[in-house]
Amino acid sequence: MRIEPVLPSRAYQTFQVAAPRSTHFERVTCERFECQAATNGWVTAIDEATELGQKQAYYIRRSSGRKFSEEKTPEGLTRFTFAGGQDCFQGHQQRIEVPSIYMVRSGDYRSLGRPRVHTRPEFWVEEFAEQTNKIRDLQNRG
């Protein structure tokens, strides 16, 4: 739940630390991710009464290239049990060693201005502290 702002958007500043998936993460194998499903195996239950379930089951049976056994559950689902030692379906990602992006924007979520990017994290921290002190001073004055 978001608290509704009292002032107009231009009265605020937004401090943000970002690590976008496109630049700060990479896809990794189950082995590198130390994936427990790939190591120990896993179970996937699918409802083939739905269109999505039918597509998922078709993919598992015809295209996945994984070893599995299947059975029907009392609830009518198809339970696929996958042996360990093969990649799961997760598509794991891990953070790479790229520094985060430290930004300050004018405005709040209602209308953000163009980001001003700090070249060093400590400069962002310093600006954040200065802004926080200004707010505290204004509150103390009443």
Image (tube, grey):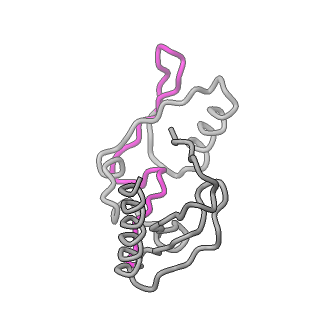
Q: How many marks?
A: 0
Q: Is 74 in the magenta?
A: yes
The residue positioned farthest toward the right in the image shown:
51
Name the one closer to the observer, 33 or 136: 136
Vertical relation: 134 (above or below) 55: below
The secondary structure that dominates the magenta segment is loop
Q: Nearer the viewer, residue 123 or 137?
A: 137
Whether residue 52 sits left or right of residue 66 in the image: it is: right
> In the image, which residues are magenta?
70-97
Residue 88: within the magenta?
yes
Residue under the image location 63 percent in, 63 percent down: 112
Q: Which residue is pictured at 66% across the width and 27% down the height?
A: 50
Instruction: Give coordinates of residue 29: x percent, y percent.
Output: 41, 64
Residue 107's spot in the image, x, y percent? 60, 62
Along the horizontal axis of the image, is 43 left or right of 5? left
Q: Position of residue 11 (x, y in %)?
A: 58, 61
**Residue furthest to the front:** 141
